Image: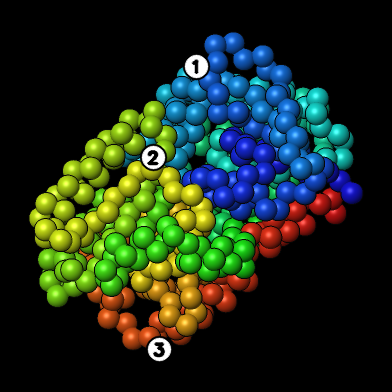
């Protein structure tokens, strides 16, 4: 059987269990990789003179190979084009997009370095599965160096309509680069349709059904929503609920309902609006004061990007405002942490929460929404409040769907969730649970790999 080669910007530490890793990609793939798989990417290290030779570590039969970056590459490729141009653009935030030609050149150069380091490790019949927006030019770079095997790409974040994409100066180059893959995968049908429309408009290639035809080659585009190991997460959550950590949490709540949010501290996640929504709940529904405690876990992320530093300052201020305004001497409404929490503890916290609040302004999928659902006790489940602009909203239609730009809508949904009778909570949760147990991480991987297999 053909070997699977996974390429992603960051490579997780070999087979960790329960370690704090606040990224959706690693979480979904870690459980799927089989012995024999090669996983290649950046080590996360910045050094003065990278050797260009991969460092190889074996973890339960999986080979992890990583290379280092130098400071200039890190600035241009990672901080620059990937996280200051593509990330905001593909989350519909043109006002935050910063583009510099040298950043794009650095992005192409690092993709070339990835291809140089990976190529000697590849066998002709390998299936290469490339992940996410950092590595869009990798197929073209591998092809230019003579690799003729199958290469697929999955975009974890949203794809945008042509009227948004056209703001990016190298939009044409990126679309051509995407068309160098054999399979291109997206989280939702909406992202897929936007990609096909952009390919048609920007490149002049023809589109036939869900395929782009480029000089006789066919690029197949698929929608393949990512999921979680739902049964595994439910088990971990159930077990965690009995631990001393969760017992301490329950004691600290003194019978109050817990509302929980957890994510990377990122401007796509809609944190300021959510904080304002919570403040409006307390102001407009004063009867809920003292009956609710909100826990926001916002794991620090991309601290070298200026927008993330600004967001952190804004959240510090908003959290202080809310607690200054509403706290009583024996009740603090908002608990705000920027450290990561171990995965098992997080699962236990989800389990005992009465409300899960997931309100990104845009999100490719959002796995936290799915984890929250899986973690609930079906007999007495919590309520999920979910942004209509998360990819997950296409599947999780029985959540309380809100427009995350409207803090009053968030406040109303929180009040509805607090007042929701048990029967309705159970009904909604049963439907959500079916969806989360159907579209799992394993299904996501199998669908992609099946599409990538040679015909
Ligand atoms: C990208 C796309 C897409 C969060 N805080 C902690 C922690 N987490 C874990 C969550 C979840 C993962 O990190 C986050 O996944 P998301 O999907 O919610 O978000 P992104 O990191 O932005 O991921 C996203 C995803 O890729 C997969 O395709 O869904 O749309 O943006 O598993 O539980 N984990 C621990 N401590 C924390 O404090 N241990």
Q: Please report whichever mark, 3 or 2, sits nearer to the chain's N-terminal start.
A: 2
Whether residue 93 is visible to the viewer of this picture, yes or no, is no
Which of label 3 and label 1 is nearer to you? 3
Point 35% across, 43% down: residue: 338
First-in-chain label (3 vs 1): 1
**Residue 273 circle label:** none
Q: Which mark is residue 423?
A: 3
Q: CA distance from mark 3 to mark 2?
A: 38 Å
Question: Is 76 placed above or below 445 here?
Answer: above
Q: Residues within 10 Å of mark 2 (few under 14, many from 20)?
A: some
Residue at (28, 76) in percent of width and height? 418
How many numbered markers are drawn?
A: 3
Tag 2's secondary structure?
Answer: loop
Q: Quadrant of the C terminus?
A: bottom right
Q: Secondary structure at mark 3?
A: helix
Secondary structure beneath dot 1 equals: helix
Marks 2 and 1 sit apart, C-alpha to C-alpha, by: 21 Å
Q: Residues within 10 Å of mark 1 (few under 14, many from 20)?
A: some
State the image coordinates of residue 208 (x, y, percent, origin top left).
68, 57
Earlier sequence position, callout 2 versus callout 1: 1
Q: Which is nearer the eye, 25 or 241?
A: 241
Left or right of 303, for residue 134: right
Q: Which residue is mark 2?
A: 300
- Compared with 430, 332 (above or below) is above
Residue located 47% across and 62% down the image: 243
Q: Nearer the viewer, mark 2 or mark 1?
A: 2
Q: Give me the disc on residue 71.
A: 1
Whether ligand 1 has any atom under 8 Å from the Cβ at mark 3 is answered as: no
Q: Nearer the viewer, residue 294 or 392?
A: 294
**Residue 336 in view in this figure:** yes
Q: Quadrant of residue 48?
A: top right
């Amino acid at each position: 059987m053909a070997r699977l080669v996974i390429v992603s910007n960051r490579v997780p530490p070999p087979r960790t269990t329960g370690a704090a890793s606040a990224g959706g990609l690693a979480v979904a793939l870690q459980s799927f990789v089989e012995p024999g798989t090669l996983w290649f990417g950046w080590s996360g290290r910045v050094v003065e003179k990278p050797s260009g030779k991969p460092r190889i570590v074996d973890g339960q039969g999986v080979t992890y190979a990583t290379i280092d970056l130098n400071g200039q590459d890190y600035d241009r490729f990672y901080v620059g084009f990937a996280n200051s141009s593509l990330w905001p653009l593909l989350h519909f935030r043109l006002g935050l997009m910063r583009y510099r030609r040298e950043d794009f050149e650095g992005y192409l150069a690092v993709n070339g370095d990835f291809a140089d380091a990976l190529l000697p490790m590849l066998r002709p019949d390998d299936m290469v599965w490339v992940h996410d927006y950092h590595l869009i030019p990798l197929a073209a770079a591998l092809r230019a160096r003579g690799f003729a095997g199958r290469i697929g790409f999955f975009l974890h974040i949203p794809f945008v309509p042509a009227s948004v994409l056209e703001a990016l100066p190298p939009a044409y180059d990126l679309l051509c680069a995407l068309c160098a893959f054999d399979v291109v995968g997206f989280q939702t049908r909406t992202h897929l349709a936007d990609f096909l429309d952009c390919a048609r408009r920007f490149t002049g290639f023809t589109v036939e059904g869900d395929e782009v035809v480029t000089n006789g080659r066919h690029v197949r585009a698929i929608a393949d929503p990512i999921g979680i190991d739902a049964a595994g997460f439910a088990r971990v959550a159930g077990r965690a609920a009995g631990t001393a950590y969760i017992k301490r949490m329950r004691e600290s709540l003194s019978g109050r309902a817990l509302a929980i949010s957890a994510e990377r501290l990122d401007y796509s996640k809609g944190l300021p609006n959510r904080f304002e929504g919570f403040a409006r709940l307390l102001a407009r529904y004063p009867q809920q004061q003292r009956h609710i405690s909100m826990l926001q876990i916002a794991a620090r992320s991309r601290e070298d990007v200026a927008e993330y530093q600004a967001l952190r300052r804004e959240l510090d201020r908003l959290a202080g405002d809310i607690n200054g305004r509403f706290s009583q001497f024996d009740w603090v409404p908002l608990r705000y942490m920027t450290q990561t929490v171990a995965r098992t503890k997080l699962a236990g916290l989800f389990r005992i929460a009465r409300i899960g609040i997931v309100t990104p302004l845009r999100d490719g999928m959002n796995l936290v929404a799915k984890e929250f659902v899986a973690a609930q006790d079906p007999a007495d489940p919590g309520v999920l409040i979910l942004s209509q602009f998360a990819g997950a909203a296409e599947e999780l239609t029985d959540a309380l769907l809100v427009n995350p730009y409207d803090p009053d809508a968030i406040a109303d949904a929180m009040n509805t969730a607090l007042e929701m009778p048990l029967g309705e909570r159970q009904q909604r949760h049963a439907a959500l649970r079916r969806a989360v147990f159907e579209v799992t991480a394993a299904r996501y991987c199998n669908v992609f790999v099946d599409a990538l297999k040679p015909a």
